[in-house]
Amino acid sequence: MYIFLKNRPSSASAFVLQAAQKTSSLQTDRLIIHIKATFNNTILTLTNFQGQVLTWASAGSCGFKGARKGTPFAAKKVVEVFLKKSMDSFWRCSQIKIYVCGIGPGRESALRGFEKIGESTPGRKFPNKILLIREITKIPHNGCRPPKKRRL
């Protein structure tokens, strides 16, 4: 199947340049940080307001394996790696929202790690851009029907 483009670039380098311009034109004036803290892992995702993922980090991607991925220490290291990866996006944005999901052990230490957003670059004044922290953990209201009682 062939796709013919009307405005086709004349060379491959021009095509790569157009793709780079398209990815850099993502709106990053308002950002959302999603923290998903499960019992087995802690995942941080940085998105814009349209939901397009800009960067992400997890305890598994930071080198932790097995039961150590769900610890508060692993969550603290994930936040450090996440801040290094996304610091340029933080400088360009005007406001940041944080959404927290899950009840894992790394949840509190992940939130506390974001206090260091302004401290990572000495000498530069970093204004407080965190607008809100929202809890979006799903809570069952009476939940599923329990299994029937066992008869002996």
Image (cartoon, grey):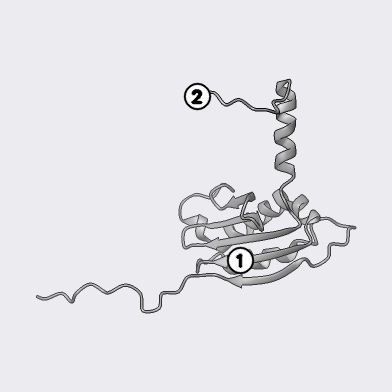
Mark identifier at residue 99? 1
Q: Amino acid at mark 2?
A: Met
Q: Secondary structure at mark 1?
A: strand
Query: Badge 2 is on which residue?
Result: 1
In the picture, measured across the screen, residue 103 lies left or right of residue 32, that is left
Q: Amino acid at mark 1?
A: Tyr
Residue 131, horizontal then vertical, whole percent: 73, 70
Residue extending farthest left:
152
Residue sitting at 49 percent across and 49 percent down?
A: 65
Position above or below: 127 against 28: below
Which quadrant would residue 43 be assigned to in this image?
Answer: bottom right
Residue 75, horizontal then vertical, whole percent: 59, 59
Residue sitting at 11 percent across and 76 percent down?
A: 151
In the picture, measured across the screen, residue 75 lies left or right of residue 1, that is right
Position above or below: 18 against 113: above
Whether pointer 2 and pointer 1 mark residues with C-beta atoms closer than 8 Å, the reply is no
CA separation, marks 2 and 1? 42 Å
